[in-house]
Every structure is written in structure tokens, then in C-alpha cells.
Image: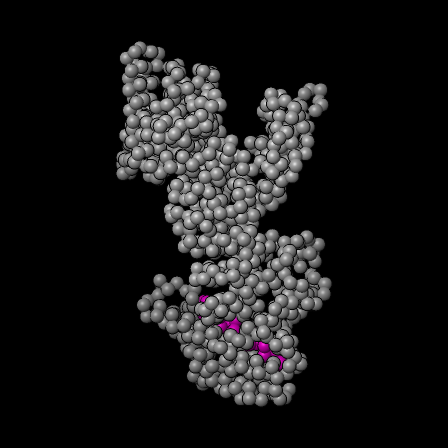
Amino acid sequence: MWKLLRMDTLQCLSKQFAAAATAAGVLTPPQLEYLATAATFLCDLVAFSLGGIMVEVEYGDMAGWLLQVARALRDSSVLQQVSRLLLLREDAVAGVAPPPDLWDLPFIFLAIYHNVTVLCRDDDDDDDDALTDAAATEAEAVRATLLEVLHGPCARHTVLVHGVAMLCRADGGPSYGLPARLIVAARPWTRTDSSVPGALVICDHSPRALLVVCQGGMPPTRLGRRIAVLLLLRLGRLAVASTAARAQGAGGASGALGPLLLPPKPPLLLLSREDVLEVTLASISTAWSQLQEALALQPDGWAAAAGAQLWRLVDAAMREGMGANNEQLRWLGSKLSCGLDAVLAKDEPLPPAPPPVFAVALAGGVLPCVERILRRAGEAPFGPEASFAEGLLQDEAISGPFLVALLAYGEPRQAAALVATLGKLLRGFSSSCPAPAVVPTGMPDLVVKCHQQLAHMTSYAVCEWLPPLSRPARQWIAADVALGLGGTWRSQGLGPLVCWLPLLACRALIGGSGAFGAVDEAAAGATGATVAAAGAWWRFILEEVAAVPLLTEALCLCERDDAACSNAFNHLLALGCCGVAAACPEEVLGAGREGVAGAAHAPCADALPCSAQGRFEPARGPAQWRPELLRVLARVLRAGGEGICLEALEALSAHLGAWEAGSGNPSEAWREKGEKCRKRLLAAWGRLQAESPEMAAIAAVLLPPAEARALLRTCPYPACANLAGDSEADLRLQSCAKCAAAAYCCRACQVAHWRAEHREACALLGPGAVRGLSARCCAGPPVPWPCEVEAKGGGS
């Protein structure tokens, strides 16, 4: 190879092609055969350079080798002369080109263009950090030189001609001004496809070469960017259509493409199986990156329409599968979410209207697309959809803002359906069946800075997501299963729970009568509705989230040397303990257990817990939380430099200690000591909230659970995990024929709910209790469905 380079072989070949171009229209068959041989030799030289890289790596001189090849390709202009000859020849013959055995230059040229691209990419993939300064400089020179070769005007134009001709013959779409005679002359090389009768498979490099030009060969202008995006979308549609055609030819069903494709001209033209995956992944990711640039500079109409088309293409591609592995789909999901941090910056407020990038994604159906993919991921937790969803939603930098923006800007019913689907996924969250991490711990910080359209959706999300996380979190801690999960359970399960508990405690105390000094009745403008809402959240904390036993188990982590909880988690745990103790003192002290005090302290529908109003004197007994564990947590926080909640934590441990010390001794002295500790806790919690005003701000926007859940009528069975269909909003609900208050998604849920609890509720409600329910709550009008009565004699 060195000898060939020193002989200026590439320069000699370039002169031969330049001379042939002067008589492109009258070349004889022997001359064409000679040119094809010369082009084959050129292709072999480039391919040999690519293969020689691995040899040169062993000698540590790869960059120097490639630089010689790159400079020879650039200085000889051989690729420009080949492409010029090809264009002139195809224009001269006007669609009556000689047979391929005498004129295979198009195939060879596209192969050369693709191989040069591989050379450039291979060098770009090298680890420049491991190179010396001189070697890194040389490697950058190789890249710059090869890009000059690829961006030559003749070479780029030739690739575009062949790429557009290939697309026109495949999808019947616009030619962008390319003359019809060139569309015929530049037809792609094809072969028959045995899997699809009557179809032809493109077997040259025109799809990949066109992809290369669109990825980096267009001028960085508005027009260049528009051309690249539109071509990439057509290329991606062709790739997805090829997969769909093969699925149908093999007896599979495929209706995902819909109006994405124009009617093709016969015969059906398909990409090869080898090209489908690369073209699909690269065309989608590259088009999205260039659309982000276009929308950031000036949100033109074409960009908005193209963005909507792209997300419809994403949905179609995921439905068809493409044959991608999990890692590739995870990468695609990350690429699609990449760049959103620029418009949805972490910890920054969302603008009142969606940014252009997000607006086009919503117009293209990103919200129902994400929900459908998550539902399929729930059915196959280790399948391709789960990997794609992981890449799309779990990026640490943007997962919170991306999810919050979907809920904030999406159509309310679609957003509510996504929330409900995520809740069902979390019900199956376990070490063997991991659901996507859809409850970011930083979500409260985002909510307080965002606009009010999130109030309803956030309240609904809290109701749907926190209860299914509570039970497995308690089980994992108690059974020591959590220690083998490498912290995943804590970040995806326990972390969001303890993050929300102090906020929910604040909400439960709004409208109280002196139980919480920082939010008094006058400041909150307490009314009957306010008190009722606070009582509803109080019941939610105790009954659905089971906050007291949850924190009991979480405190046990402080005793484990191998738990290695972070300072942030310990801080949230301390906040949660103090907040729940302030809102639910009797339950924390142990007086709210089943059989102790019973209904004496149970809240009515429109009141706060009686203990908060000072009307209940609990029975003495051991506290739910051991005071020594709280003292251990305080020492851990002090050692980690987290001191903001130490005062409240120490006051809580003193209160619990005083309570236990006075057990069996209900003297006035012990009672006064406990009350003094209680007041100290409330005062410390009030100061803690004053230092963190965002807690009250978040609590103030939370709607009562019943009002939040009215956004979307779903199956009332608490353990429902039905993921059938593409959306929770589309599930057809069937009403209980007796009371019509409950409408179920399937008979299994109806039977389970009847046996668990609905039998008693149905008897209390009576016939036709909710006949006035609005039909808009269901995907369709409820269909009467009689409840099954479990009895020895059967019957329903």
C-alpha cells in the first residue's frame, strides 16, 4: 500500500476518470469495462486501507497511516472525478444505461463513499484521551481531511441523486426537482426477496451513502438542514416499511404504518435486512438532532410538521421491532431524550407553553407512544420496549423534567392515562420484574417551580404511584432482599416515598386547629372543604401509603452497617419521620394500632384526626418507633453535615422516649413531660418548614385524592394490573349491575374486588347508586356486569 501511494496511483486513476468524463456519452463497451476495472481497483485500495488499520494498531502508527491515505484521497480528487464521470454518463444515456456487467460504476462509487465514511468514523471512535498530544493532533487532521473528501460537491451531489432516485422508486414520493431521466438512470441495484413475493431488495450502498450525506454532509444552513431531515424521514419510513412487509409476508400482522407511507410504485422495493436496523436507528436519531437545531433557531412550519412525522415514525418503528437488541434500543431512547435538558433544564421552571421541540413531539403523539411502549414493557420487563423506555425516561439529567413536561403539556386525559399506566407498572415492581424508574426523587423540587397545570396531574400521580411502592419497600427491608439490589430499590421505591411523606404531612395539617403552627387556620384560609381535604390526605398517608410501618422499617436501615444510605436519603428519612409524627402523633406513639382506641380517633369524612384537635387521650403503650433508632439517625446526619432537621429529630426522639417512660404511669407529671416534648416537636417542625417554604407551596397545590382520581375513571380494584390495549383511557369498563358505582376492566378484577371488599360496599350503596356518573369518565358507556356472589351454593 505504501508503494502504491508513493507511485501516485490515486492521482493516475483520477486523471483517467477525468479524461473519460469528457466523452461520457460516447464511451464504448471496452472503455466502460476498463473504467469499471479501474474503479474496482480504487475501491479495493480504500477497502485495504480500512482492513490495514487493525495491522497498524499493533505497531502504534494508525493515525500516521490513515493520514497518508486521507491526503492521497483528498489531493488526487479521485472521488470527485469518479462521481463527475458517473453523473455525466447517467445524464447522457438518459435512462438507457448499459447492463451492469459493463457499467457497475454506481455500485462501486457508493461502496467507496461508504468505506471512506467508515474510515472517518473508525478514527473518530478512537480514544483520544489515550493518545499523546502529537498523536491526537494527527488523528484530528485525519478526520478533517476525510471530511473534505466526503463533502466534495460532486461526490455529495451524486449520492443525493442516487438516494433520491432510490426513494422515488421505493415510495413514489417527491423527486425534489430531480429529472425523470436521472431517476431511471440512477436506479438502484436490486435482487429478488424470497420472503416477500414480487418484492425487490436494494443491494447497493445507496441507502447507507444517503444516510452518511444527511448525517454530516449537508451545509449547516436552514435549507441544508431541511433537506437532510426530509430525506432522513423518508429513509426511515422505507426501513420500517421493509420490516412491515416482511412481517406480513411471513404471515404476521402489521398495521402500524398507517398514513406514514406514500403508495409505492411497483415492484415493491425493500431495504435489505442488514440495512434496516442501521438505517432506522441512524435516520431517527439524526433527524431528531437536526430538528432540535432547526426549532431552536427558528420554528418554521416545515420543522413542526417534520417533528410530528418523526414521532409517528418512532411509534411505527417500535411496533415493528426492527430486530434491534436491547442495548441498541436503549441507545435510541437516550438519543431521543438527549437535548431536552436544553429546553427542560433541571430544577428550572417550565414555561407556560411547551417549547417548540416539545410541542412537535406532542403533536406527533409522543404521549400515547410512551404509554403504549410502557404497557408493552410491563408485559415483558426484559424485552425491547422496556429497554427503549429505560433509555427515554431514565437519563439522570432529564428524566424528571421529561416526565413532568409530558404531564404538564399533554392532553389531560392522555396524561392521566399515562399516570395510571405507570401506577400499574409500579404494582409489579420487584427485583425479578423491575418497572422503569418513573418516580424521580427530584419531582417535588420541579413541581414547586412549575406552573399550575401540574397541580391536578401531580395529585393524581401521588395517589397512583405511592401506594404500590409502599408494600414492596416494607417487604424488601424486612426480608433483607433489598441489600442484594445494589441500591436500585432505594432509588426507585423507598426514595420517592420518603421524599413525598413530609409534603403529604404538610398537606394533612393544612386547616388544622393549632396542631401545626407554621400553617395556621387564618393563613390557610381554612374552610370546611380545606379541613375535609386535609382529612382525606391524612387517611391516605395512614391507610394507602402505610407511612408509620413504612418508616418503622426504613429506620431499621440505620442499624445496618451494609445499608450505606446516602446523606440525601437520611435527610429525607428524618424529614418524613418528623412530618408524619406531627400529622399522625397517636399512630406513631402506638395508640393508633388496631384494637387500641379503635374508632375513638378515626377521622370522619370532613374532619382532621381527633388527636390533632386535642379531643382524644390515647392509651399508654410502647411507641411504634424506637427512640434509639432516631438517635442513631441523628448521629448519622450530624456526621454527614446534614443538620437542618436535627432539632426536630431530637425533639421527636425525646417525645417517644417520654411516652415509653410514662407507660403504665399515667401521673400528671409524666403527662406534662410528654406534652412538653410534643410542643417542642411541633415548634421545631414549624421552624423547619419556615426554613423550607417550598414544602408548604407544594402542599398547597395538592388536590384531595377523590378529586384527583376523578380525572380518569379506571378499574377500582386496587391490585389491577391489566395492561391490555395501547392506553388506559381506551379500556372499556363494565359496571357493577347492582350499584353501578364500580366499573371494571375485566371479569378477573371484578371477581377479586367483590371477594375482597366490594360486596359490603355494594350492599351499602344499593341499586343505581351512581346512575348519574358522566359517560366521559369511561372509554365507552358502562356495560352492566353483575357482581359474582361468593357463596357455597353458587349463584350471582
Q: Looking at the picture, tell me which residue is in the foreground, 562 or 603.
A: 603
Give x and y (percent) for residue 689: 32, 33
Q: Is residue 119 magenta?
A: yes
- Position of the C terminus by quadrant: top right
The answer to whether residue 361 is left or right of residue 662 is right
Q: Looking at the picture, tell me which residue is in the foreground, 311 or 241.
A: 311
Is residue 649 placed above or below 228 in the rendered structure? above
Q: Residue at x 68, y 52 (%)?
A: 253
Give x and y (percent) for residue 718: 55, 31
Q: Residue at x 64, y 81 (%)?
A: 94
Residue 672 appears in view: yes
Q: Residue at x 41, y 55 (%)?
A: 342
Is residue 331 placed above or below 691 in the rendered structure? below
* Residue range corresponding to the magenta coloring: 103-122
Q: What is the image's colouring?
A: one colour
Q: Main secondary structure of the magenta part?
A: helix
Q: Residue at x 57, y 44 (%)?
A: 375
Give x and y (percent) for residue 316: 60, 55
